[in-house]
Image (cartoon, rainbow, N blue to C red):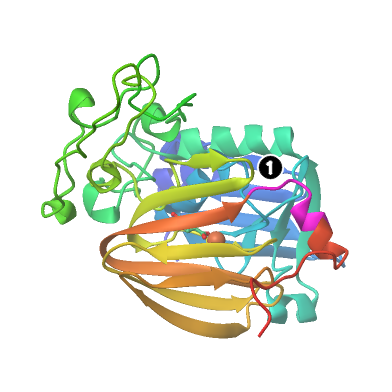
Amino acid sequence: MNAPTELAKVMASQPHAVLGYKDFSLGSFGFRRDEYFAHISWKTQDGRPMSHTMDIGNFLRALMRDVAWGFFYGWVNFDEVFGTVNHYTSVDLYGGSFNGSMKAAGVDCLENFPSDQIRATFEQMLDDWTNAEFDPFAAPQETGSPYGRKNGYNTAKITRARELAKRCVGLKDDLALRTDERGAPVNRAFADVPQDQPELHPEPGFENEVHAFNLFAFLSRSQVTWNPSFTSVVKYSFMCPTTEEHMLPIIHGNDRVEWFFQMCDEIHWNSADKNTGKPLARLIMKAGDMAAMPAYCRHQGYSPKRSMLLVWENGSPSLVYEIQKGESPEVPVQF
Ligand code: PHB
Ligand code: FE
């Protein structure tokens, strides 16, 4: 065998010096990135070393959602092996624990962390591992490459913040619409979406009380995909219309029932048992279709063309415990 080159020696002893990415750890989990992959390592229940590899683009797209959604409702599976479970003040981090085969083989690991600790590590990892040209919230055709050696940061795109409206968006003294005024262009896939606004005829004196706007025109200008970023909140009823293109970057495992209304085009869903990953159903949703995801499933959607989806969540903080105690149903309707 040839003697190792100088570069190979540096790579072996100091990978950071060559690739430029930091390593991270949480409990017995280790995280490392190279030009193409995220490498996750842990110790199995009987102390053996175990590891898992993910495409770095897929890993960063999933990590972006987990961070931005505050660990979401229930399970955020980055893929069939690795992910998080939200307990709302703490978060489980797991490798293989919800993969039937790995669990049976005893090569899984699950550790619980305070939400603040895992959030801080995930935020740092997302910032360090996302290069200047890659936007993990953008559709794959609308962003640069996630691959290669460390090449700058994209902090602005990974820290997009939610803006809160106090009343109907567009009313005086509240948020302006993020449409023409702010320069967001209509997405290439939504060139046919009418941009006209509804006519308003409030009685004199009620001009500041009555308002309406064109939701489809608003959504047609969304810069991000697979992000319930624009939400109406009425008590615990959260209506989250979103625009979707390519795949949902996570496999979401429910801890409550969740509804989908396909508002245009189509999304194909795979649904599986949330504990094992065993396939349960295949669902082709076309414009106008509605579906409910039961609390015992996980699901991942594929949108061949950018589409509009309304996700309806029950945000009640006690619901997950009511379901665990059998006081609330796991399904939306009993036939
Ligand atoms: C889901 O997990 O149900 C989900 C998440 C984000 C979306 C759409 C659906 O944009
Ligand atoms: Fe979901």
Who's the residue at 26% across and 67% down the image?
A: 265
Q: Residues within 10 Å of mark 1 (few under 14, many from 20)?
A: some
Q: Is residue 309 above or below residue 153?
A: below
Q: Name the foreground residue: 175 vs 79.
A: 175
Whether the magenta-drawn stretch holds residue 45 is answered as no
- Compared with 133, 110 (above or below) is below
For image coordinates 36% across by 37% down, the residue present is 131
Element marked by disc 1: strand
Stretch in magenta: 315-321
Tag 1: amino acid: Ser
Count of numbered marks: 1
In the picture as drawn, the residue positioned furthest to the front comes out as: 203
The percent position of residue 321, horizontal first and vertical second, equals 82, 56
* Residue closest to the far left: 192
Q: What residue lies at 30% left-to-right and 70% top-to-bottom?
A: 287
- Residue 185, image quadrant: top left
Residue 241 image position (x, y, % from top left): 40, 50
Q: Is residue 21 visible?
A: no
Judge whether residue 318 is colored magenta: yes
Residue 87 seen in the figure: yes
Residue nearest the observer in this picture, 49 or 4: 49
Where does label 1 land, which residue? 25
Q: Nearer the viewer, residue 2 or 100?
A: 100
Residue 71: image location, x then y, percent: 63, 46
Position of 178 relative to 53 (above/below): above
Q: Residue at x 37, y 22 (%)?
A: 175
Q: Residue 233 at what x, y percent from top left? A: 54, 40
| Quarter of the rendering occupied by the N terminus | bottom left
Is 276 placed left or right of 158 in the picture? right
In the picture, the quarter occupied by the C terminus is bottom right
